Image (cartoon, helix red, strand yellow):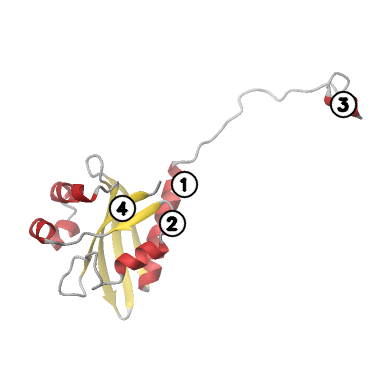
Amino acid sequence: MSERILCWLVDSSVKEQIVPDDKSTRWPQLFNYQGSVSYRFIFPIMDLDDATQIQPATIENAFMSPLLLVSRRYDADKLLLGQLHQQNGEWTLDWQLHDARNDGAVIIRGQARGMPNQLANQVVTALEAYTQEHNTITVKNVTQPRQVDPEQSSYSQFY
């Protein structure tokens, strides 16, 4: 089952700075296109409820109380907060992933640079690497290797 990541992104290059889940921007499509089976990226609808409680400064300063409160309606597992900047045709995304289920603690931070599809790809790659690193199980053999006598092995009887 994929984790639901609610993306609160501020795009300083547009009038309505918080990236909404609508056709006015390509960011939701790019993130889900670059996504994996591990994640489903959702963006706020930015209706009256969202717009009155969340401002760009709320996201930029990671004020978790209002973000967690408003984010409940989206049933997200994680919150991705980020600031998008465009300069000389290149994009930069400074981002941080927060736990939406508990206290909003920061899980991982990063920065992505390049074209929009590259930014989304870099974020997804970083999330997957983090998840893989923290979900790896190491099995350690604490017993000594055992010697098998070929004369007594039932397997050796067939040769």
* Spatial CA span between label 3 and label 1: 41 Å
* Spatial CA span between label 2 and label 3: 48 Å
- The residue wearing badge 2 is 36
Tell me, for residue 156, which label it has, or none: 3
Q: Are marks 2 and 1 in contact (CB under 8 Å)?
A: no
Q: Earlier in the sequence, mark 3 or mark 4?
A: 4
At x 18% / y 58%, what residue is drawn?
Answer: 59
Instruction: Give left or right: position of 155 versus 29.
Output: right
Per the image, label 4 sits on a secondary structure element best described as strand
**Depicted 112 relative to depicted 103: above or below:** below
Q: Give how far across and how far down residue 122 sits, in percent.
A: 40, 62
Instruction: Give left or right: position of 147 versus 10.
Output: right
Please tell me which residue lies in front, 86 or 8: 8
- The residue wearing badge 4 is 5
Image-quadrant location for residue 24? bottom left
Tell me, for residue 132, which label it has, or none: 1
Q: Give how far across and how far down residue 101 sits, in percent.
A: 26, 41
At x 56% / y 32%, what residue is drawn?
Answer: 139
